[in-house]
């Protein structure tokens, strides 16, 4: 695999050419994010620094499309890679084999991955500011699972990891 700096140069070149989808496809291959349930990328409206929206769309059990902002690569590459990994977690959660019905569980798993990179270890770390944000979002979804629910019990050990990370970052 190329170095992060090499990837950054390639991303900037593609971005200057307006090839957002091509560079996103390149990155999922380079960072091992591929999934057979992934149908492709589509562009959405431009993102703003305070709100970068990527979504995974498609019926559960069917191939998924990830919609990314047309200006995705104007933002830090580390952050964009983490957001792409988040969406690729959703792609795998929506396969016939791994089907996860509960949205709170899907989001918990995706945010947990952004913090600890257990499935995609090659994804780079983000700034502490973003880690705090992701950890708080993860905890929001954990709390929505229901106090003492089976899902909360299932993820209790991971929640302790998130709590500890927040403690370190505060």
Image: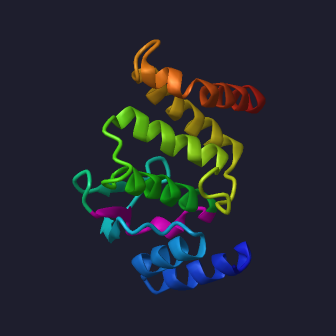
Q: Residue furthest left?
A: 59
Image coordinates of residue 85 in percent, x first then y, are 52, 57
Q: Residue at x 64, y 41 (%)?
A: 131
Is residue 52 rendered to the left or right of residue 127? left
Q: Residue at x 62, y 31 (%)?
A: 158
Q: Residue furthest front?
A: 97
Residue 43 vertical position relative to residue 145 in the rendered view, above or below: below
The residue nearer to you, when weighing 136 against 157, is 157
Of the 4 image quadrants, the one containing the N terminus is bottom right
Is residue 12 rendered to the left or right of residue 150? right
Image coordinates of residue 22 in percent, x first then y, are 44, 81
Q: Residue at x 25, y 51 (%)?
A: 60
Residue 116 vertical position relative to residue 87 in the rendered view, above or below: above
Image coordinates of residue 117 in percent, x first then y, are 64, 51
The residue nearer to you, when weighing 136 against 111, is 111
Residue 132 seen in this snapshot: yes
Residue 52 vertical position relative to residue 77 in the rendered view, above or below: above
In reply to whether residue 131 is colored magenta, the answer given is no
Of the 4 image quadrants, the one containing the C terminus is top right
Residue 53 seen in this snapshot: no
Q: Dividing the picture into quarters, in which one does residue 42 lie?
A: bottom left
Q: Residue furthest top?
A: 148
In reply to whether residue 69 is colored magenta, the answer given is yes
Q: How many marks?
A: 0
Q: How is the image coloured?
A: rainbow
Residue 162 vertical position relative to residue 16 in the rendered view, above or below: above
Which residues make up the magenta segment?
Answer: 63-77
Q: Residue at x 69, y 53 (%)?
A: 125
Is residue 61 rendered to the left or right of residue 119? left
């Amino acid at each position: 695999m190329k170095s992060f700096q090499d990837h950054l140069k390639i991303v900037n070149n593609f971005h200057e050419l307006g090839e957002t989808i091509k560079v996103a496809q390149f990155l999922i291959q380079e960072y091992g994010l591929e999934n057979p349930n992934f149908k492709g990328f589509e562009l959405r409206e431009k993102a703003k620094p305070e709100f970068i929206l990527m979504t995974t769309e498609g019926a559960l059990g069917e191939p998924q499309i990830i919609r990314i902002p047309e200006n995705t690569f104007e933002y830090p590459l580390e952050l964009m890679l983490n957001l792409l990994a988040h969406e690729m977690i959703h792609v795998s959660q929506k396969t016939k084999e791994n089907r996860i019905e509960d949205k709170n569980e899907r989001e918990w798993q995706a945010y947990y991955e952004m913090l600890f990179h257990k499935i995609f270890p090659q994804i780079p770390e983000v700034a502490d500011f973003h880690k705090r944000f992701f950890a708080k979002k993860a905890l929001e979804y954990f709390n929505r699972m229901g106090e003492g629910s089976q899902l909360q019990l299932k993820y209790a050990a991971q929640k302790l990891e998130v709590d500890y990370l927040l403690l370190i970052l505060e």
